[in-house]
Amino acid sequence: MISRIDYRFACSVVALAAAGVLTECQAHSQDGFGASIRSSMTFHASFDGSVDADFAKGDRRLRTAPGSDKRTNAIEGLPKEGNVQLAPELGKYGGAIRFQKSIQPIVFYQGAKNLPSLRPDWECTVSFWLRTDPLKDLREGFCDPIQITSKQWDDAAVFVEFEKRGERVPFRLGVYADKNVWNPTGRAFETIPAAERPLASVDRSPFFSGEWTHVLFTLKGFNTGKANGESKLYLNGKLAAELSPREQTFTWREDQSAIMIGLSYMGLMDDLAIFDRALTSEEVAYLHALPKGVRGLP
């Protein structure tokens, strides 16, 4: 565990490096804080020159499928329709992936080994940058810039979503345990009170600026059988919303799990990374402040 003194020192090193007072090499040589984050990484796609991941404990390749329920029919690479493209110079750091049309097909990475293996007291962190103007770019209804599951959106799944209804576009973190855990009686979703839905919402999000926004969520205390599962959503390095502690039991077939990106989303995504533990709030702030993003970790 890094102390607050170490954290402040690490942040000062990053700031000095960004200002040119320290060289990148000097900053990295003194940065054990970032090295701890780096050692937890299981997946990173920078989108600099390729849509395939730069680093992956599992399969690096991006795949295209006719739909989220038809991933077994996937092919390697981007959709031929051109609705998803590599944007070499438009990223927060270098390149980005651009979603130009809110249509099928979908693109995804395989989850096996790229996601932390499910176990008792499971943890995970997912980090990425988005650039969109919801009122101008998104269609009415729901879109999920990222959704992770082996099943469907309401059964052992985690995602972030926009819901556009006229001038109102809240941004949410959804964390749905196994369906028989969070909805054991099979109630219709529209009949479930909002307070009981496993959603953490941000009504006034920073996306309306059309600038890059850092999105990160952490999952902790899953698969314990107890009501201690924690889910937190951070925007631009700060805690924005969280779910109250609850039982979060996730079961899925890892060979069928998927990291789906850009579901009905229109805009840019950059610097997607996954870690095998829940980063602390200090680590989240540190990651957000890195001048070169995840690639700049030592």
Image (cartoon, rainbow, N blue to C red):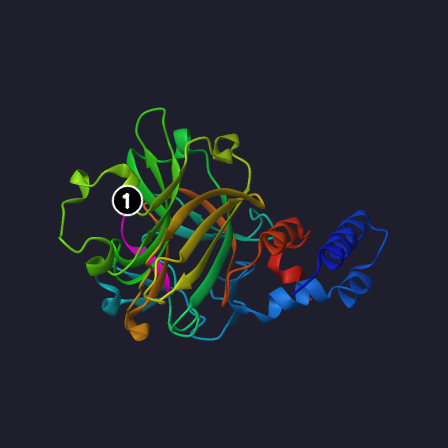
Label 1 Cα neighbours within 10 Å, binned few <14 / some 14-19 / many ≥20: some
Viewed as shown, does residue 281 lie left or right of 181? Answer: right
Local SS, label 1: loop
Which residue: 51% across, 65% down?
A: 277
Q: Is residue 106 magenta?
A: yes
Image-quadrant location for residue 23: bottom right
Residue 280 in the image: above or below residue 168: below
Residue 273 x, y percent position in the rendering: 51, 60
Badge 1 is on which residue? 197
Residue 80 x, y percent position in the rendering: 33, 57
Viewed as shown, does residue 268 lie left or right of 249? Answer: right
Viewed as shown, does residue 224 lie left or right of 125? Answer: left
Q: Is residue 67 visible?
A: no
Which residue: 66% across, 54% down?
A: 292
Q: Is residue 12 visible?
A: yes
Outermost residue, right side: 21
What quarter of the picture does the C terminus occupy? Answer: bottom right
Q: Is residue 285 magenta?
A: no
**Residue range of the region highlighted in magenta in the rendering:** 103-109
Residue 85 x, y percent position in the rendering: 43, 52
Image-quadrant location for residue 165: top left
Given residues 107 and 240, the one toward you in this image is: 240
Given residues 68 and 103, the one toward you in this image is: 68
Residue 4 x, y percent position in the rendering: 71, 55
What quarter of the picture does the N terminus occupy? Answer: bottom right
Which residue: 45% across, 71% down?
A: 60
Which residue: 40% across, 73% down?
A: 117
Outermost residue, front side: 226
